[in-house]
Image: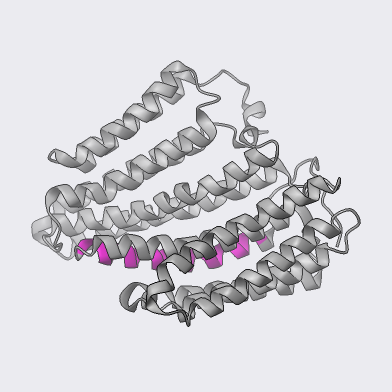
Amino acid sequence: MTARDPHEPHRAATPLELFFDLVFVVAVATAAVDLHHALTDDHIGHGLVSYAIVFFGIWWAWMNFTWFATSFDTDDWLYRVLTILQMSGVLVLAAGIDPAFEHDDFRLLVAGYVVMRVAMVAQWLRAARVPGYGRTAGLYAAGIAVVQVLWLAWLAAPESLVAPALVVLVLAEIAVPVVAETRGVQAGRGMTPWHAHHITERYGLFTIILLGESLLASGNAIIEALHDDEAVAPLVSIGALAVVVTAALWWIYFWPPHHEAIGGLRQSLRYGYTHYLVFAAAGAVSAGIEVQIDAATHHTELGDVAAGLTLAVPVAMFVLMTWWLAIRERGDAVVNLALPLGAVLVLAEAFVPGPAVVTAVVLVAMVVVLVVRSPAAPRNARER
């Protein structure tokens, strides 16, 4: 194993990385479906907490592999085997999502998560043999291993300690990269050599996967319409609006050049960690669209305002987080006014009739602002 060149030209996602992402589709889809069921049955608090916990496991395992791959992807047989082992852990985690939502049973979920993380320990131990990165990689391996032991112990914790221990474990997980990279810099070894274009491409690809769940919800609206003659018009309308909303979110996310949003350690950590909210919001949009379908067919326990908020909140969060993360430092005064204001309007629309229609209109207006205010650049420059 050797370190990858952080300035390597034409660095792109590998077939193995794309295969890895494909397995995560299963976990993301399962989490979105369970969130939809919890929301539409008016179990909002329990559903949101369960979704936040489950999605943390999905996001953190994906992100750790992605940043490791940008630094040390050698694509030899052992690297592939360990990656496939992580993929098997994703499937186990996905199988544990239903019990986590329905019975607060996290045993299978944690088992799958630990399988993924133990495979990462093996990868970091390999990286520890790369000259110049032994201290940093060793800290990664040790930190991840200790936290996995604590996750297994958490399963046996008394009920009164489950919630506070969960918070401590999550903080411990996200502290490992901070400690490892900081100590590595202090030792004069530098950070792990991540590739800005490659890492932001990987985040963009995962965002597309998550937004694809919303298109699936749109397809479900059309399918439902074929089985309910009385609701054909509203369901087809929801399907069309879902396409507009999803396309607008895609447009907003990919408007700025994301590779300019990461530079030093602080920026890279901000970019990586803030994407938890971006990804979680994108996944929840699908559940919100499904709730709109339920509301149109009178199959939900929610009132009109609550049903509207199930879509408005994740859309607004996605827009605000994308703006704060990658747009605000590049956008002019008009852009930096339009996007936060648009997000606020999306939230307010849950309190008026036809919130999905107004949400789509506001998002299209934001896209128009971005198009008009986009800096002129040759096509080939934008593609680079």
Q: Is residue 192 left or right of residue 53?
A: right
- Please state which of residues 360 and 262 is positioned toward the viewer in this rendering: 262
- Quarter occupied by the N terminus: bottom right
| Residue 320 visible, this angle | yes
The correct choice, above or below, for 313 with respect to 26 in the image is: above
Please report the bounds of the magenta region as a residue range. 17-40
Q: What secondary structure do most residues of the magenta stretch adopt?
A: helix
At horizontal 15% and vertical 40% (from top left) the residue drawn is: 351
- Please state which of residues 160 and 117 is positioned toward the viewer in this rendering: 160
At horizontal 50% and vertical 23% (from top left) the residue drawn is: 331
At horizontal 38% and vertical 42% (from top left) the residue drawn is: 317
- Please state which of residues 121 and 179 is positioned toward the viewer in this rendering: 179
Residue 278 position in % (x across, y down): 46, 47
Q: Is residue 225 left or right of residue 230?
A: right
Q: Is residue 149 left or right of residue 107?
A: right
Q: Quadrant of residue 360?
A: top left
- Quarter occupied by the C terminus: top right
* 208 within the magenta span: no
Q: How is the image coloured?
A: one colour
Residue 67 position in % (x across, y down): 68, 54
At horizontal 83% and vertical 58% (from top left) the residue drawn is: 135
* 38 within the magenta span: yes
Residue 230 position in % (x across, y down): 8, 58
Q: Quadrant of residue 86?
A: bottom right
| Residue 83 visible, this angle | no
